[in-house]
Image: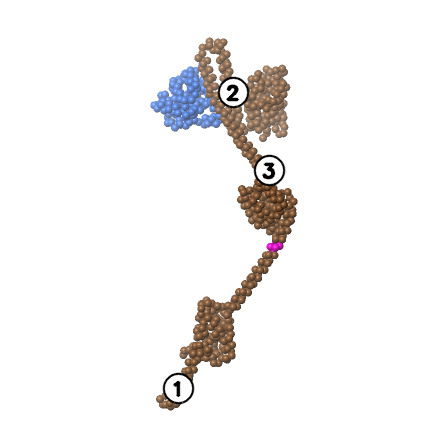
Chain colours: A brown, B blue
Amino acid sequence: MSEFEPTAAELARANEELREQLEEAHELIHAIRTGAVDALAVQSAEGPRIFTLQGADQSYRTLIEQMNEGALLLAEDATVLYCNASLADLLRCPLAEVMGRSFDEFVPPGFKQIWAALMLKGWAGKSRGELPLRTQTGVLLPFSVSMNVLEFNETPVLAVIVTDLSAQREITAIRAQVAEQNALLDRKNEELKREEAARLAGERAAAEASRVLEGIPQIAWTANPQGFNTYLNRRWFDYIGRENAVGSDQGWDAHLHPDDRPASGQRWRECLASGEPYEVEYRFRNRAGDYRWMLGRALPSRNTQGEIIQWIGTCTDIHEQKLALERIDQAQQQLRDNNEQLTRANVDLDNFIYTASHDLRAPISNIEGLLDALLLELPAATTQSEEVHPLLDLMQDSVNRFKRTIEHLTEVSRLQKEHGGLAVPVDLAAVVHDVRLDLEPVIQSTEARLDVDVQATTVLFLEKNLRSVVFNLLSNALKYRAPNRSPHVRLRTWTEAGGVVLEVSDNGLGLDAAYTDRLFGMFQRFHDHVEGSGIGLYMVKKMVENAGGRIAVKSTLGVGSVFSVYFTNQ
Amino acid sequence: MQKLACVLLVDDDSTTNYLNQLLLKRLNVAEQILVAINGKEALDLLHVHCQTPFADCPVLILLDVKMPVMDGFAFLEAYEQLPAAQRQATTIVMLTTSLHPRDVERVEHLNIGGFFNKPLNREKVDEILKKHFGRQLPAE
């Protein structure tokens, strides 16, 4: 510049040009800053270069400014070169602060990858996608973005249209809600229809049931599947004393006995849950205020799908039966008590007999011993004297009788103990034969005729007891003979209904029928002129019964007696 | 016949004791007769008479079953506890009126010389002498 010196006018002109340029630049920057003029700020190696949008058609720009969508141009590094006011609005950010900023800052951290992918595809040609953007206020809003590569001032830029989806989302949500409401309404309608059908079916069933139930002689009722009473027949209202009432009675349980409520209620709930038949005994108060026992029964009634549509029940008056049963129970209890008492009494009696026989034995043997000692001490002349001799004989007799009685008591006591003893098959004919031999002297002396006809072979018995039975019966027949005729005794046996019968008949004294019951009692004697202990027939009966058999007697006073022993073979 | 040195009668019935004493004296079978009215007294007598070897320790005890204070069974239990040497020289025979099968069974299981039903008589004494002492009564 030193070789060429410009003139003052040239300098002034150059100065003027530079000033104009400067002013222009100032105005441009101002305009860009205020958003009045669009510009491009392009980062280049020499620093930011600002391009105005001189080349863009004004009418398009106006159009873009009036769009609801956001529009922007991105440099390769995602710097916002340009954006419209709508975008600034959408991002809640002043326009001036959007431009020149990296758009990355508006992408939320979780969506960087999606954004990067969209960008990559966009730079390759075009791309489209949805993602949320973070506004300046921090709120995330849904957007759809659509990208295109453009040539702008010989620099490739990415043109991006950003559409706010929130409104759309809202509409979608509302639609979904509406759809859902509609579906719900449809379902409700369906349900109402079904309920109506069920109600009608239930009513039909109930009406049908009540027509039937009105005619039956018990109290009858129906209940819905929830367990509430829907109908009670006239019998119920008659029972509680409410004239001319029909239909259901929700207050029916006021008549139920308070003590029966918990159990019957519990069972009812169980049956409602399980569908099992209901059966319960409970008391209801009638019109007179008295509680009567009822048998309550109910069965579920089901539709064709197997669902319970109602319960049909009856209450049957079982008051008398129930009381009768209670009386029977009481009577049985009484019987059990009595039995126990009798068993105790028997045991006591048994012990008494044993103790008596035992305790009497010692003193009587002492008396006998003392009598013997006395006899040894007395001079023979005294003992043989007319005065003393009978006394001593009578004393000895009494002692012997006493001892015999004790022996009998002991026998009885032994019999009690041997109850259920081991029975074996015994040859009856052999026993009869032996006893006959033993009695031969008596038979001879009484000139008796004894006919024996033994058919049966064996009976189940203790052998010594069987001998005792036969001996007692035969010797009694001879002992109680009639004084005016010689004794004729017949012994026969036969088998009857699976058991052996032994019969001994005589033509002896016989007995009045009134006494035959007492014949088998202990220490019963009916003929005082005949020696006897009164224990024989008691023992016979006891032995026969202990062996599971029985004995019977038929007797006619002055004609004779027939004793029949029925043996058992079990 | 050589007499038994000492016989102990144990019975709560004084008449029985009197008669048995009379019988033994008449049969002339014992040098000494001791009497106790229950098992407890019998044990006390044994304690006194069996201290020194064994001059007047009873060689035969006739024992009743039913007695107050200590009955025959309880006496036998206590007797089993005495030193064996003391028991060796003594025979115990039970006299009973009890025919209760339970008592009979119980007596049969006892470790004793035997048992007899009351009353005691010449035949029973003779049997005891033969069985346990190898002697017998002279003929009447």
What amino acid type is highlighted by mark number 1?
Answer: Asn
Pointers 3 and 1 in contact (CB under 8 A)? no
Give the residue type that dot 2 points to.
Answer: Thr
User: Reading the chain from its start, which is encountered first: label 3 or label 1?
Assistant: 1
The amino acid type, in three-letter code, at marker 3 is: Glu
Secondary structure, mark 1, is: helix
Q: Is residue A555 left or right of residue A12?
A: right
Q: What span is colored magenta in the figure?
A: A194-198
Please give the name of the residue rendered at 58% of the width and 50% of the height, measured from the top-left corner.
A225
Q: Which residue position holds label 1?
A: A15
Per the image, the residue denoted by label 3 is: A320
| Residue holding disc 2 | A405
Q: Would you identify the image quadrant in which residue A290 lies?
A: top right
Q: Is residue A20 left or right of residue A524?
A: left
Instruction: In the rendered view, tell whether residue A68 sits above or below residue A224.
Output: below
The residue shown at (43%, 73%) is A97
Residue A491, visible in the rendered structure: no
Badge 1 density bin: few <14, some 14–19, many ≥20, Cα 10 Å = few
Judging depth in this view, the residue of A34 and A528 nearest the camera is: A34
